[in-house]
Image (cartoon, rainbow, N blue to C red):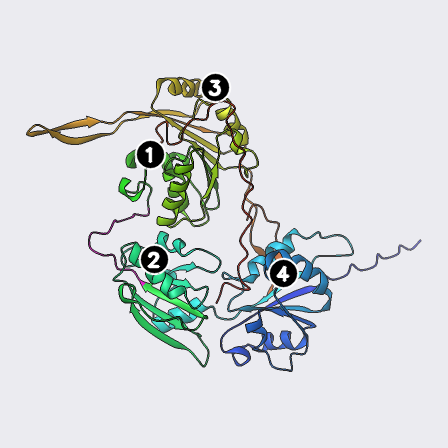
Amino acid sequence: MTSQASPPLPAPPVLTVVGIGADGWDGLAPASRDALRTAGVLLGGARQLALLPPECAGERVTWPSPLRPAVPGLIAAHAGRGLTVLASGDPMFHGIGRTLTEVLAALPDAPGAPRPRLRVLPHPSSVAYACARLGWPVAGTEVVSLVGRPVASLARVLHHGRRVLVLSSGADTPARIAGALRERGFGPSPMRVLEQLGGPAEARTDGTAATWERPPGDPLNVVAVECVREPGALRLPVVPGLPDEAYDHDGQLTKRHVRAATLAALAPEPGELLWDIGGGSGSIAIEWLRAHPACRAVTVERDDARAARIARNADTLGVPGLRVVRGAAPGALAGLPAPDAVFIGGGLTAPGLLDACWAALPPGGRLVANTVTLESEALLTRWYRRHGGDLVRLAVAHATPVGGFTGWRQAMPVTQWTGVKPGEPVPAPSGGATPASPGDTTPASLGEAAPAPPGEATPAPPGEATPAAPEDPTPTPPENEER
């Protein structure tokens, strides 16, 4: 009896992404030209599509706005027709390649209908061109994208002597960068605007942030900044424990030395999410976010004035992505994404707060709570007996004048409990793509790609909780961040 062979499974369709620069068709490698010539559908921004010659005869489709919500439908409509996507520069560097990888990973891979495979043909990025023109080593240069992001994002990387390349969102970006540098004490910094990099119309304009008055130029530009801090400007280090004067506050601020110890206990890692309960001035969440650009944070604050102050502090200190939820915990925690760590700086004795935060943590998650009152200290002592962890008392004294001499003035001691949720931590999902063959990538599955004296937040009276606002949707950048 002979067995009958199963019919071969259909090959997955290929979604090709081709990077293109300001030099257009002339700057493309042979493989990229071949992909564009044979494409049945060409999808890209109007500027990129206009760079193609008539021999690229595929149907031309311009990206809609907003872009990201439309991507799954466009792939479903055109993937079987030889769909090729145009991107600026390197598609995987602040470009459409990441969006496509995430969207493809979310598509079902059913028998007989495999999801498309991604094939990426990159072009030199604007950062590669800029560093080559300036003689800057790429590895020693900070890169910040302002495409779809506020200019306040720049503040996090401003340090004396550092070199920064900024991917602009348009012609007015250089002037906005100059304004931000002046506001943050970096007015003497030299600026260079590099336009149409790699193309026949390439141009460069030099100046300083303090005297920048140039009118808007070409929208396709990158701004190079050599950071020079003004004498006397506030110095903001990269480690936790920023100077207290860096914050606008009403007295409810986790002071510098205790703040540094609290961040050490919270132990942020790239990509992790913090709940900061009782935000006050926002200092803990802000310095969590400054630890790494991939860190995320939500701060919960029931007082309107303090919530507004937190947002201003986040902008000033370069982390405008901090999400501020107006409400009283634990009610305001409903609907928030699961945290990797929780800090409770205010309202510790609110009924059910500790239980709700502990329940929300995954195995391996951390909970840190600070207090200066005996009532809250007794509560933390009970939790220490139940869950273990670390219970410490932090005491700081400052030298102050005593008549004609100097003595120590003791601040109120802070009791801090740190607990780690038992169990094996859940492995972080990969956000990248695994190679399929040379030039190809197969998407992997993706996941969610003071110490506060009591009063860092006002405690919530029972029953006064306000539900949290729905989480803001991910902003959709223009067709490609490599402008």
Looking at numbered disc 1 in the image, what kind of residue is underneath it? Thr
Q: Are marks 4 and 3 in contact (CB under 8 Å)?
A: no
Residue 262 locus on image (x, y percent): 36, 34
CA gap between label 3 and label 2 equals 49 Å
Compared with residue 287, is residue 70 higher up or lower down, i.e. above or below? below
Residue 444 locus on image (x, y percent): 61, 52
Residue with the mark numbered 4: 436
Nearest to the observer: residue 238 or residue 191: 191
Looking at numbered disc 3 in the image, what kind of residue is underneath it? Arg
Q: Are marks 1 and 2 in contact (CB under 8 Å)?
A: no
Residue 386's disc is 3
Compared with residue 283, is residue 72 higher up or lower down, i.e. above or below? below
Can residue 20 be seen?
A: yes
Q: In percent of the image, x 38 and y 50: which residue is there?
A: 318
Question: Which stretch is magenta?
Answer: 226-238
Residue with the mark numbered 1: 254
Q: Residues within 10 Å of mark 2 (few under 14, many from 20)?
A: many
Residue with the mark numbered 2: 180
Q: Earlier in the sequence, mark 1 or mark 2?
A: 2
Can residue 291 be seen?
A: no
- Circle nearer the viewer, 4 or 2: 2
Q: Residues within 10 Å of mark 4 (few under 14, many from 20)?
A: few
CA gap between label 4 and label 2 equals 43 Å
Q: Earlier in the sequence, mark 4 or mark 3?
A: 3
- Determine whether, in the image, residue 52 is placed left or right of residue 407: right
Q: Earlier in the sequence, mark 3 or mark 2?
A: 2
